[in-house]
Structures are given as C-alpha cells and as structure tokens.
Amino acid sequence: MAKPKRRYVCAACGSVTTRWQGQCADCGEWNTLAEEAPQTVFSQKHHLSTGGRPILFEALDSNTPLPQRRGTGLAEFDRALGGGLVPGSAILMGGDPGIGKSTLLLQAAAKVALSGASAIYISGEEAAGQVRLRAERLGLAGAPISLAAATSVRDILTTLGSTQAPALLVIDSIQTMHSDQIEGAPGTVSQVRGCAFELIRYAKENDVSLVLVGHVTKDGSIAGPRVLEHMVDVVMSFEGERSHQYRILRSLKNRFGPVDEIGVFAMAGAGLEEVGNPSMLFLSGRDQPVAGSAVFPAIEGTRPVLVEVQALIVRLASGATPRRAVVGWDSGRLAMLLAVLEARCGLNFSSAEVYLNVAGGYRLGDPAADLAVAAALISALADKPLAADSVWFGEVSLAGEIRNVAHAGVRLRESAKLGFRDAFGPPDLPAKHDEARFHPLSMLPNLVDRIMGDE
C-alpha cells in the first residue's frame, strides 16, 4: 500500500493543494488552508470491478409511481421551491445572520406537522428551550414538532433509524454538525462535506425532505466547500436588509422547478408573513410625482414585480470631484449608462454627483432595468417628474439603441393589472397590448426628447 499523501483544503473555495501556503492560489483568501485527513492510496492491483453489490436499472417509462410534492402550508415558500417539498430531496438554505432563516423553517415545520405529517427540527446552535421560546413568540407552541439539540451526526442518524422516517427534517445548521469518523473541528471542509453526505444519503433512502441551513461568508456566498451546493437538489438564498421589513427567498438551483423563482415575506412581530402582491410593497409611498422616479417591471423567475428606481442629481462647483453612489443596482452598469447618455445624447453628468437607489432595499440584476434607470436619471437632470402611471423597461446598448428583453408581455400585463396605463420599451413590441398603452422607443435620444418635452 502506498504512503498516504497530505492534502490541504481551502475553507473558502474548497480547492485542494499538496502543500500548505498562507494564501489560497485560487480564491486569494489568507489563512484558509487546513490539512485534511489523509486518504489511503491503494496500488493498481486493487480494482473496484469486483466485490460490490449489483445495482438495479429502471426505465424512464417505468410504472413506479413518481414522488408527489408536499405543500409546506406557506404559499410563498412553496412557490420558491417550485410547488412544494419533493420526498427524498435535499435543500440548502443560506442567508445572513439574523435574517430569519430559523424563523421561516420553524414556521414551515409547524405547518407540516399541523397538517398531519411528521416534522423533526434539530438545532446545533440553540438549546431546545431557546427554540421553544421562539415557537411561543410565533404562536406555534402547540405544533407537534419533534425538537432536539444535537451536533453529532452519528447520534442523529442512530435516533432517526430507530423511528419512523419523518416527512420533513430540518438541520440548523450544517456547519455545526460533527462526525467522529472525520478528523477536524465542526465547520471545516471535510466535516461539512462528510456530514452533509451522510444526512443526504439518509434522506434519499427514506424519502425524507431534508433542509440544511448554511452559514454565509462576508460576500454573501454559502460557507464551506463548493461541492456542498452540487450535492443538494435545491439551493436557496434568504435575502433582505435588516433595516427593511421585507425578505426574499430566492431559488438559485432547483432540480425540480424553475431557477430564480422567489417568495416574498415581511418580518412582523409574530414572525414572517407572506406577501402575495410584492409590487404593492415596493411601490408604497408614491403619493406625489417627484422628479427622478421611474417604475420598472422586473421579472423574478416567473413572477413580475414592479419596483421604483430613484435618481438624484446634485450639481457641484467647478473643480470638485463628483461622487457616484448606487444602492440595489450594479455600479459598473450605472457608469456605462452615464457614459452612453453623455456620448449619444449630449447630456452632462461629469460635473454632478449621481445617486441611484432601488426603493425598498430591492436588488436588481435584470438588464431590462437600463431604460428605467436612464429615465430616472434624465428626469432628475431636467427636474421634470415622469408620469405616475407609466412603466419603463428595455436594455440600452453602447450605441444608444433600446433593445428587446424577455417576458415583455408578462411585464405589460402586470403593469396594466396594477393600474399603470402607459408603458415605454423597445420598438419591436406590439403597439397595443392588453390594457397598457405601449409607446415604442428605438434610441436613447427619443427618450430624452420625450422627457424633456421636445416631442
């Protein structure tokens, strides 16, 4: 048998190297390499072609019944999952500390338990009494949830193996779990990977819906090895600003449903409340028309959400360095859009400070927001309010063209349903669509002329 080789694994990105070094060569993080337990290396005479158990193959058109989804009782949670929990699935949920992950999962487990199915909630971060205090505050003290505080995967699986498999198993969190078969402290790459593998294998073999809570790093990505996201079926991110009441549950990976689907919740005194119409939440407070405000119909998964884009232009004295501040949008895309407005439309932003904000703490990643941002900037520069019942969407190219975007019909229908009479967008859409009056714009100068009043 050959001598075992040393392996060093980065706790930030999961890359492997054969020698220790202060900085990870792949992700650039410092002091993140830790030695992993040595793996036994067998000689070539030990083959894996014998000694195993034969596996059974199954045809795609087999008569075996397909797994049926189970609703959690929270419509927004089910929407983000693609319709509910799939038996035997593994779900990884990440989010900032204090954002409400444990609260949401405790509410979901209570709904499942009250529906007649069994639900188990295992906490590795809190004592059972602390979880019960939260349940009492949420009004869930009477829910028949099986609660435990444990961190040993061996103890957890031994206990689960002696009882009937639950419909839902919540592990809060995977970074606190520990296996006595793996060297290293809880939270290390080898421990997280090994513990997750054992728990996922139990869920697959017993048709249990498993939810793993994951910690996040300072940049918002899920902590631990990247392979953890490949092992699970669904990766979800619970997002939101703690200064705002709303929370967004976003699906980043889903083997059983659409990706980028969202569920919207509002944090209240009695826990998380579902928001059935998030557009009204993000558009609240628009009583009087103000210059620099434009409404954009965003698409999150299959759901249209109307949000308000706000811009402020402040002229500076000559010689001062202008500032650019962005909240909820990409700062690089704002710089590009300002350059296009200056080069193609002759507008001057070089001597002014530019502030851009997406109302409600919402974060936009849709390129169709270009036209709404441009409209808000031009409106703020000209100090002319846009029509309160209008929406703006379209992608802006470096040549100043307004290009078509996906799901235009869905955006228009949602806008008309919420009372917006006019819509401005790319020229290759139909002039009339449902109840919204559509006004095509082919070039960015056309937008400037319309707002400035030259058309």
Image (spheres, helix red, strand yellow):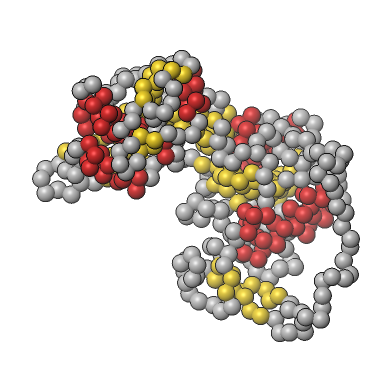
Q: In the displayed structure, does residue 262 sit left or right of residue 83? A: left
The residue sitting at the front extreme is 428
In this rendering, the answer to whether 155 lies above or below 71 is below
| Residue 436 x/y as whole percent | 43, 17
Write the residue at 48% across / 40% down.
Answer: 240
**Residue occupying image coordinates x 73% and y 45%:** 89
Between 297 and 323, the one lying in front of the other is: 297
Do we see residue 268 in this rendering?
no
Left or right of 115? Residue 83 is: left
Q: Where does residue 394 sit, x and y in percent of width and height?
A: 39, 33
Viewer can see residue 316: yes
Asked where in the image residue 368 lies, by quadrant, the reply is top left
Image side of residue 368 versus residue 196, left or right: left
Give the image quarter of residue 113. top right
Residue 137 on image: x %, y %:
61, 34
Q: Residue at x 34, y 28 (%)?
A: 441
Q: Quadrant of residue 101?
A: top right
Task: Quarter of the image for the C terminus: give it.
Answer: top left
Q: Residue furthest left?
A: 318
x and y percentages locating residue 179 in the rendered image: 72, 63
On-image quarter of the N terminus: bottom right
Is 10 located above or below residue 369 in the figure? below
Q: Residue at (87%, 57%) from the top-left corner?
A: 55
